[in-house]
Image (cartoon, rainbow, N blue to C red):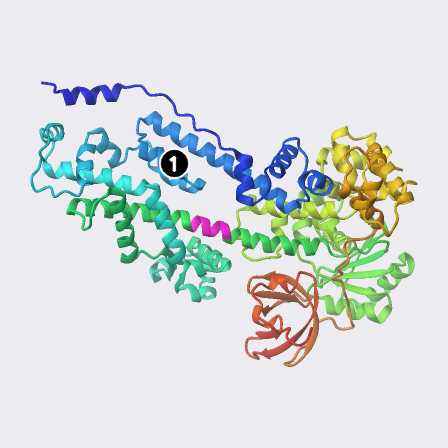
Amino acid sequence: MTTDIQKEMLEAEDAEFEWTILEEPDYIKNVASELWFKDFQVKVVLDFIKEWATVPFVARYKKDQTWNLDEDQIRLIVETNTKAEKLHKAKQTAVNWIEKLGKMTPELMENILKARTLKEVEEIYKPYKSKKKTKAMIAIEKWFQVVADLIKQNIPLSNFPPKGERTEQEILWLLEKYSKEEILEWAKHIIAAEVASNSDLRADLFETLQKYGNIVSKIKWEKTLEKLNDKDKAQIPKFDIYSDFSQRIAWLKPYQILALNRWEDLKILWVKIEKTDKTFEWLKMHYARILWVRLPFILELEEAFKEGYDTLFKSVENELRWILSELAEDDAIETFKKNLWNLLMTKPEYGNKILAIDPWFNAGCKIAVLDELANPVKFDKIYLHKRGEAISKLKDIITKEKPSIIVIWNGTWVNETLEILHDITDIDIYVVNESWASVYSASKIAQEEFPELDSLDRGTVSIWRRFIDPLSELVKVPVWSIWVGMYQHDMPEKKLEEKLGYVVEDCANEVWINVNTASIYVLNHISGIDKRVAKKIYKNRPYKSRDDLKKVLSDKVYEQAVWFLRIPESPIKYDNSDIHPEQYKLAEFIEKNIDNVKSPKEFFEENKEKILELYPEAWVNTIEFVIKSLQEIWKEKRVNSAHQKSTKKWSVEIKEGDIVDWVIRNVVAFGAFVDIWMKNDWLVHVSQIADKFVSDPREEVEVWQKVKVKVTWIDEKTGKIQLSMKEVN
């Protein structure tokens, strides 16, 4: 016989429901509020980006509309908006799927809407993504919710079923199919799932662990470590400090997080967030307040909460560690970005004919002669063990080719090569770091540039070009292959490529680019120019003016790109400035009429009618921009040179107390690595960088900075040394 309760249950299973369409957030208002910008600034930026404007273009030439937002701020707006859009889309996907399964509840909907991150939505959504039903889902389908609700009232179940007409009918119906123990067990699964997905409990646990939790790591069992390959086994001694490690999460350094992640991924360490009784009891009190009941819990509620707590803790642990990793990666990438910027902005050395040498012994020293326009005009080879023949050939090349500078790699046989060169010539010789040359020489770009050369010759040419113009040459090397940070190869490649790609883009758009000499690969980084357009520009050289350039570009590309391109051969001086052709008449008016005593604001106010006639979009900032651009025509923005002139003996035999001139090659959270140009980078610890407390080495030193370093200690057995920059810079 079918009861009324059974009928209601069957009808509910067949009931139709309407799809829930989540209201889309006001992205502009939310982004502006989160980042402390004005609504109109966010709107202007997003509108420009939707129209395919590039970040450097908006940052430099639309300041009047963005209120002077720089590249980083513009990208932050775009990224924050993208994250918000993805979060909304993830929530809608989760809601659609859970509703399709017929599992949506008001509490679950509330938890999804309150989710702050993609990871949190993913954790809530995870049980429903699997085709396999969870125990809680099965329990709800079997109508054990009524018992779960009863347990949540924290009423002792000594008399089962409890009195109450409807509740009693429902439970009696369940008792016809299941034992009391089975009913209670299934009900506890429902409560546990509710605890695990409760947004308020989640937020409380997250905040508690973030502020007061500890992360711990221990080295794995010896039998587990024996299964590692030899390469990974060799890494174990490097991280003894983490073999029995405990640290407050709030005090963790970004590099510690990355270190823990690396050695966990290599299966050397177990890494966990510590689960304590204090945290458990605190969250249980919170749950009691949610249920409006008093502690202690009845046995069934205590067991259900414990089951849900364990699931929730694991979920929050995953989310918190994901967030910590994101923050650590972002910090490491910021270091990469600053170091890469300084590397790419190294001062160029134009107008020299170069003799470039790659020192080897048995295979011979590769030689390349390159003209003033960066073209290789001669290749040859000498053998160091045939000294007389090598001297004769070098003398002949120097006499005939007349190079103004000799550039040599800091390879293994650099001293032997330098000894010969210094004996036969007084030409300035510079030793150049060979890092990343092999990456370029084997790349597709190198093969496209020099299809007729082997990889060694390509590398030799690359080293010379890097000496002349680091930016133009290093843009050809994949940014993730340029080692100017730490844990670089642990970063997600796509994320690293995107973030460091911004640096390359900003550098290329910061300096003036000679359109008649720039390579396709540099042009490709200019605002509005893709590889197809870059090839088109390259193919139609030379250009005599920006007007000539306009003939080969679309209006859209020309509008964005022309600001960043220079044409030395042009008779119009503004063609070699940051000033746009649309502003030329305004620039001419300013030059003829501005009084050096007057401010741009006064000039604008006094000549507003004429200024707007010449350039309708002008305002005070436009006048400031034009004046500054006129002052910087042909001014080289890359002023720091890292080139080291060689002495007769390049390697340095050091002893304690020596003070040596070296160059910083890498800056990381715990110090700076100095390069002695002999394949050795030695660490100056953060505590030894300055005569004061230094929390962040990046605030004191930068890549390619020349510094004096004191050798304070040498271990004669291991060769390890300690260095200091205190009291010597």
Outermost residue to the left: 159
Q: Percent x, y for residue 422?
A: 82, 70
Residue 269 drawn above or below residue 617: below
Q: Which amino acid, mark 1? A: Ile
User: Left of 186 or right of it: where is 350?
Assistant: right
Residue 147, picture quadrant: top left
Q: Residue drawn 48% across and 65% down?
A: 238
Which segment is the magenta one?
321-327
Q: Is residue 566 visible?
A: no
In the displayed structure, 116 sits above or below 665; it is above
Relative vertical location of residue 711 with respect to residue 97 in this rendering, above or below: below
Q: Residue 663, position in %: x, y?
A: 69, 66
Answer with left or right where residue 573 lies relative to residue 341. Answer: right
Q: Quadrant of residue 91?
A: top left
* Residue 159 in the image: above or below residue 254: above
Q: Considering depth in this image, is 238 or 36 the residue closer to the camera?
A: 36
Q: Quadrant of the C terminus?
A: bottom right
Majority secondary structure of magenta residues: helix
User: Dot 1, crowdedness within 10 Å: few (<14), some or many (≥20)?
Assistant: many
Residue 326 sits inside the magenta stretch: yes
Residue identified by numbered label 1? 112
**What residue sits 90% from the left and 40% below the top?**
572
Q: Nearer the viewer, residue 523 or 473?
A: 523
Looking at the image, residue 705 sits to the left or right of residue 273; the answer is right
x and y percent of residue 142 in the render?
19, 29
